[in-house]
Amino acid sequence: MYREGMPGTQPLADEAILRLVDECENECASIFRSFDKVAEKGQYKVLSAMKKARLSDTHFSFTTGYGYDDAGRQATEKIFADVFGAESSLVRTQIVNGTHAIFTVFSGILRPGETLLYCTGEPYDSLFQGIGLTGDSRNSLASHGIGYKQTGLLENGGIDFPALEKALTPDVKMACIQRATGYSSRRALLIDEIAQWAAFVKSRSPDVVTMVDNCYGEFLEESEPTEVGVDIVAGSLIKNPGGGLALSGGYIAGKSQLVGLAAERLTCPGIGGECGLTFGQTRNILQGLFLAPGAVRNAVRGAVLAAAVMGRLGFDVKPLPGDPRSDIVQTITLGSKEGLIAFCEGIQAASPVDAFASPIPAPMPGYEDEVVMAAGGFVTGSTLELSADGPVREPFNVYFQGGLTYEHAKTGVISAAERLRIKGFPG
Ligand SMILES: *Cc1c(COP(=O)(O)O)cnc(C)c1O
């Protein structure tokens, strides 16, 4: 269609790029199909949870004031808990993002003298200040006397079990995994690896709380970390589980006692999860959850296509098109600031909102380097919608993700490839 140029439109890209993308799409057909089973299982889980909670129209209205006994909030949290195979959950618009959800878990559970152990190398950039690795906040874990240490990943991207064994000293109270790639060049950890890790930690140190930063990982595999032995997970509603419809918020799911501690940190002791309005967001959040398994499948197909196309154009990509996936993020190494910007310009130009804007590098609260972002979604900052972003630092990786529909993700890939071509990449 865009080939012919509809009245008033121009072909989206150079003929050679359109041909390349079609070729890659054909080559990826069986990979694409492999995601159907996971989406079906996810859809069934969500549907079953909604039926079990006897979800009805009345749950979409909301209380005011304190929000005691808000039926919609309670149903939502029951449904999330079920979908994640957890005892309970907190699903709140008051959780402002994924960083806040994760930090709420840390600060609710860890006490002075205890140590947080990361088992996947450095945590996500936006957690540095909360942990106290940078900055000088009086509210960081460090300034409350909570220690931090980490073990790195092996050459193959897997958990370093011998290092982990040594690191599990008596002061360690929580062991954490970041499931997704984040702003690094590592791969995402698979659910089987997470299960093995959780079992290992429990076998050595039964009292250590296992936690997974689940951002970008939801619905990528048939099980979630809390279904395979992990104590608690946290993530963002404007990523996978919000299905593109949740306007804001975060979730925490896991053992009731731990979720309760996090809830007391989010609000205060004595109140916990018993208060807090939904502000009428229950419908968006639940309909988003309902659409999430399919949207995640569309996004991951888009990521595979991006890997295939950008790989053929000569850029390093991770994961490779056929690699197993446990997040929706596709890393593409562009090798220069100009390449990074050109890619993001292509994605921005293919966005339904703010397509006219030009992404430029800028400082971002909570991030150490300048970040360039292409984001033109219906929900600002939603990265289950087609988006690309990357810190302006070597090796100039762009993190491409999202696409509520596969067709949109494909359009984004074409547009980014075209923009790179116009700018003379790869050079
Ligand atoms: C997005 C993300 C977070 C949290 O980010 P927010 O922007 O605060 O929602 C944490 N960890 C990982 C791996 C992420 O991708």
Image: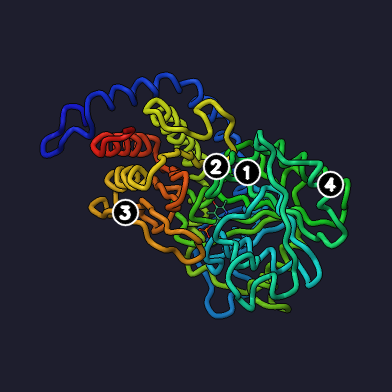
Question: Which mark is first along the chain, 1 or 3?
Answer: 1
Specify the quadrant that holds the N terminus.
top left
Q: What is the three-letter code of the residue carrying label 1?
A: Ser
Q: Is residue 1 visible?
A: no
Question: Which mark is first along the chain, 4 or 3?
Answer: 4
**Residue 320: percent from the left, percent from the top?**
51, 29
* Image quarter where ligand 1 lies: bottom right
Q: What is the three-letter code of the residue carrying label 4?
A: Glu
| Residue indicated by mark 1 | 48
Tag 1: Cα neighbours inside 10 Å, few (<14), some, or many (≥20)?
some
Give residue 185's mark. 2
| Residue indicated by mark 4 | 165
Question: Which mark is first along the chain, 1 or 4?
Answer: 1
- In this rendering, the answer to whether 31 lies above or below 179 is above
Is there a contact, CB below 8 Å, between mark 3 and mark 4? Answer: no
Question: Which mark is first along the chain, 2 or 3?
Answer: 2
The nearer-to-camera label among 2 and 1 is 2
Q: Is residue 130 visible?
A: yes
**Residue at image coords 63%, 53%:** 122
Q: What is the three-letter code of the residue carrying label 3?
A: Pro
| Residue indicated by mark 3 | 359
Kind of element beneath mark 1: helix
Q: What is the three-letter code of the residue carrying label 2?
A: Ser
**Residue 76: percent from the left, percent from the top?**
59, 58
Query: Label 3 to label 4, Cα distance in Å?
Result: 44 Å
Question: Which mark is first along the chain, 2 or 4?
Answer: 4
Kind of element beneath mark 3: loop
Query: Label 4 to label 2, Cα distance in Å?
Result: 25 Å
In the picture, measured across the screen, residue 188 lies left or right of residue 13, that is: right
**Residue at image coords 45%, 31%:** 307
Query: Label 4 to label 1, Cα distance in Å?
Result: 39 Å
